[in-house]
Image (cartoon, rainbow, N blue to C red):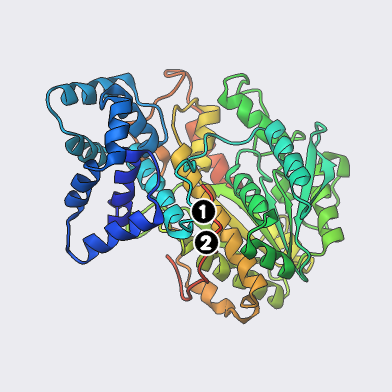
Amino acid sequence: MSSLSMQQTLQAFYLGLFGRAADPEGFDYWVSQVDNGSIGIDGALSAMLQSTEFAERSDELSLGEGWVEEIYQDFFGRDAESAGVDYWASLISEGLTPQQLIQSIIVSASGTDKEALDASTSIAHFYSENVSSAEYDATQPLVQQGFRSNDQLYTDLIALDAAYDTLSLSQAGESVEGRPIYNATVGEGSRKLMIVTQQHGDEPTGTEAAMHLLEWLSGDSEAAQALREQVTLTVVPRANPDGFERWEGLVAGELDPETTIDPRRNSEDIDLNRTWDSSEVIDASLIPETIAIKQVIDAFQPELILDYHNQNNYINASGELETISVLWPTNDDVDPMVTSTAQQAAVAVSQGVDDFDYGYLSLFPGGDTPQIARNGIGIDGIPTLLIEQRGLEEFSLKALEGLELDFDAVSSAVVLEGVLSMLGVLESMGQGSFDSIDPNLATLIPERGERIPFEEIYAEEIEWVDEGEESYKETIVADSDALQESTSIVGVSEPLPQEFSVA
């Protein structure tokens, strides 16, 4: 994993010293000072330490254990372990200066902490770059703690429906166990985009991204209002709530992995992403979740569907972990025009995530079976693009192996990346540039790199809740690789509206 860029390093200084992302004017000032050689990066840190804001914060935190704990939250999105707090506090008492402390914690970060720092500073950088000075909020959260439970998801959807006249919420159906599956629609434009998330219960980041997008698009900003006039968006968030409920139970240690249905599947033990071949007859009572999605498709008649999943860890030729992979229909029975539209969507995704300096895009190496959503729906005439984001192995290991991992900073960056991928497609459709995208550009997306197991990346850091019990890791990796479906290329996307910023 790469070292922090100059912009990320400046953001780390703001996070560590002030507990916030940089305000746009302050950030632009320090970037220009470093760029033109007026001051070095260390000099910028030294100058920040002389600020009134830092003096006030240092008085509040006493520059001891409390400050170290704050830095860990701001840098890594996690609580500091007691040994780490004691270590840094002892160095402070021996004369370690605030400047040395910040620099030392940044330089010494490794493994998951290094990746979390990369994620948190990338989010902060994005916020500073895309928020106006008038809209800047020093208390803006940058890291989301965990994921919405089913009940919280339903509460938030209902709250959005109540808060915004621009959003319409309906129940599309219910799961095998009777949990509601909702459908939220925003906009009145002639272009129609549909987003489906979490067919697999243990793949939650797409749902979080969709919820952020719904809230922004429903709002009063000029950019959102303009986009609503051009595009109508409908979202089916968390298509497999029963599987997610099981995933949460497994993570909490309340369910036994040996006797619990795989949270990827629905409660009839069926992989919903293998139920899309219209020529196959499946008892509707076994797949009510798929039936609900199909009913939304029939009623809404989208011109494009984005299907969000999570995948395992892969590393590109530069040694960087890939964060998002895409693939269009690949079945021979799909109309070439349908495939071309999905390829245009892949390019729009690439342009959307190009605004975020975190992560790497690649091409997902999926098969051509008609049971898969992107192929089956494509055969039926609707372009469908698969979007796979990283995190699946971490989520699986947390559930089935009791992996102790603070993944919030990284998952927050993945969620933001997901929002930008959605917005890239939505904006290109609304601004009229989608139809002029050359679908052949999608073939320039680099192929996904080599699979790298989690324990190989972070071998020295892995902590298991039930160390010594029989391991299921090999089974998890094999099953998820077999079941899952889920680099900027040519073109530069339109700049994001300054009103839009999400953490």
Residue 251 to residue 271: above or below: above
Query: Residue sitting at 78 percent across and 42 percent down?
Result: 181
Kindly indicate the quadrant of the structure image that contains residue 339.
bottom right
Q: Which residue is mark 1?
A: 135
Q: Secondary structure at mark 2?
A: loop
**Which residue has dot 2 on it?**
498
Mark in the foreground, 2 or 1? 1
Asked if residue 466 is positioned above or below residue 288 in the image, the reply reads above
Q: Which quadrant of the view contains residue 457?
A: top left
Q: Disc 2, disc 1: CB below 8 Å? A: yes
Q: Is residue 480 left or right of residue 162?
A: left
The location of residue 238, given as percent across then percent down, is 69, 43
On screen, residue 133 above or below 382: above
- Is any atom of residue 437 visible in this view? yes
Q: Nearer the viewer, residue 235 or 189?
A: 189
Badge 2, how many Cα within 10 Å: few under 14, some, many 20+? Answer: some
**Secondary element at tag 1:** loop
Determine the residue positioned at 69% across, 77% down. 336
Who is closer to the viewer here, 479 or 228? 228
Q: Residues within 10 Å of mark 1 (few under 14, many from 20)?
A: few
Q: Position of residue 236 (x, y in %)?
A: 74, 49
Residue type pointed to by label 1: Glu
Image point (71%, 50%), residue name: 274
Query: Is 454 left or right of 225, judged from the image as shown?
Result: left
Camera sees residue 372: no
Q: Residue at image x 46%, y 64%?
A: 354
Q: Position of residue 42 (x, y in %)?
A: 18, 49
| Distance between mark 2 and mark 1 Cα atoms | 9 Å
